[in-house]
Amino acid sequence: MLTIGGITVPIVAFLVFPLLAAATTFLQTKMMQQPPSANPTDQEKQMQQTQRMMVYFTPLMIAVFSLQVPAALSLYWFVGNCVSIIQQSFVVGWGNVWPSGGTAPAVINQPRGAGPKPSSGTNAKQLPSRVQGSSGSKTKDAKKR
């Protein structure tokens, strides 16, 4: 520990894990933050303000706690955050890490083959013909039995 003007400062080597844990916590919190809506209600405004505070206070809290506990816990937080960041980037993307400047919600890109097939102009669900039950198929099904 270094003492500068009566203030005890940890050696720089002791700051590595707390800073990494705080940085990855900030990134993860920023990724999970929801984009603001175009016309927020009073409750949504309050929620956005709380989220903004949490984005900055959570990493600060993690950094302070990391200085007080053994380094293994800081390493655990860092690795856990890295895994969560990687998982989050694959599932929904980078979120609000790099804001696009607009207020439109983020688009979730689905992998190929995921989700329903695009319909051909109708709102009805695309069901197999044997399930849809057209008038001609009813008589054919009855004849088969």
Image (tube, rainbow, N blue to C red):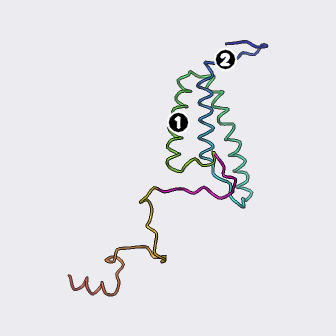
Magenta segment, which residues? 98-110
Q: Which residue is mark 1?
A: 82
Badge 2 or badge 1: first in the primary sequence: 2
Provide residue 80's location: percent of width, then percent of height: 51, 35
Residue at point 24%, 85% (across, down): 142
Q: Residue placed at 31% from the left, 87% from the top? A: 136
Find the distance from the CA under tag 2 to the CA under tag 1: 25 Å
21 lies above or below 33: above
The numbered mark at residue 10 is 2
Q: Nearer the viewer, residue 102 or 39?
A: 102
Residue 6 % position (x, y):
77, 13
Q: Position of residue 133 (x, y in %)?
A: 34, 81
Tell me the kind of residue under disc 1. Answer: Cys
Q: Is residue 32 left or right of residue 43?
A: left
Q: Position of residue 9 (x, y in %)?
A: 70, 17
Q: Is residue 15 magenta?
A: no
Crowding at label 2, few (<14), some or many (≥20) Cα neighbours within 10 Å?
few
Amino acid at dot 2: Pro
Q: Which mark is residue 67?
A: none
Secondary element type, mark 1: helix
Do labels 2 and 1 touch, CB within 8 Å?
A: no
Q: Nearer the viewer, residue 13 or 34?
A: 13
